Image (cartoon, coloured by chain):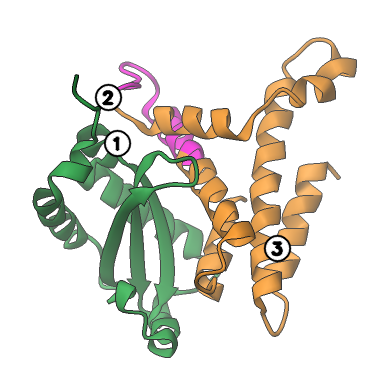
Chain colours: A orange, B green
Amino acid sequence: MAYHDDLLRQALELVHTVPPTQVTLRRGVSAAYYAAFHFLISEATSNWGNASLRTALGRAYDHGVMKTASNRIVDTNKFPFTGKDVTVVKNLRSVAQAFSQLQEDRHFADYDLTEDLELADAVAQVRSAE
Amino acid sequence: MYADVPAGYLHLGHLGTIVKEASALLGPEVLHVAYTIRPDSTDEPSIFFRILLADSAFREETIVHLTRGIAETLLAAVRPLEDWGLRAYFNYRTKSEQDRRKDPDWE
């Protein structure tokens, strides 16, 4: 099983821990973000011909740049995708929005203890990575 | 020289009206929509929506479909990036969770 699949499975196990705690919910969201992060990198680098260097190429991907790129895709002014397949564009924007959201969710989960992470939000966040 | 300030930081009243109108497009499972405008974790101007859901709406097998639909509706109606220069984020809470927390930011 691929690394990102293992991360997603771990994320699901964590948010289903009974009883839920801030540790299980927050670690679950964080794992879900990294599942999405590594999945996108894996998909992108799999297109490179030199298979032995794909993981090294993956190290070049940057969280901030990926988030910025995702938000540009969501912007219909900057990327109207005129004439493109409507379903493909909708799915692309959905993935971009989900990635940007997950990165922000991970930031909250890992760093922001000013308020609790609730179960419904955590489950929605983890499920969005699927 | 003029600073490049997002419209969402300047026209709060108008944005509030737009969000209120957009919220009316959502289904009965959405009990309340609140929002905060502030920088996100990368210091980009952003709008954080807080969506209060009816308890009956929270089912794990459908939560992604529901939340994606809510986000798509608000994104299409408010156009945070296009019209206001704001990245959009969405967080969700059930009514029972809110009743327990009594957090004024969600009411």
Q: Which mark is residue A75?
A: none
Q: Judge whether residue A92 is colored magenta.
A: yes
Q: Residue at x 40, y 51 (%)?
A: B89
**Looking at the image, residue B107 lies above or below residue A35:** below
Judge by depth and name the residue closer to the eye, B38 or A92: B38
Q: Judge whether residue A52 is colored magenta.
A: no
Mark found first going from the N terminus, 3 or 2: 3
For label 1, the residue is B81
Residue at mark 3 to residue at mark 2: CA–CA distance = 36 Å
Chain letter for mark 2: A
Which percent across, then down, holds residue B71?
36, 52
Which percent across, then down, holds residue B103?
36, 80
Q: Secondary structure at mark 1?
A: helix
Q: Are marks 1 and 2 in contact (CB under 8 Å)?
A: yes
Q: Residue at x 49, y 36 (%)?
A: A96
Q: Are discs 1 and 2 both within one chain?
A: no
Q: Which residues are magenta?
A: A78-96
**Amino acid type of the residue that numbered disc 1 sits on in the rendered structure:** Leu
Q: Secondary structure at mark 2?
A: loop
For label 3, the residue is A27
Judge by depth and name the residue closer to the eye, B99 or B62: B99
Position of the N terminus of chain B by quadrant: top left
Most extreme residue toward the bottom, as rendered? Answer: B100
Residue at mark 3 to residue at mark 1: CA–CA distance = 30 Å
**Amino acid type of the residue that numbered disc 2 sits on in the rendered structure:** Asn
Position of the C terminus of chain B by quadrant: bottom left
**Amino acid type of the residue that numbered disc 3 sits on in the rendered structure:** Arg
Q: Residues within 10 Å of mark 1 (few under 14, many from 20)?
A: many
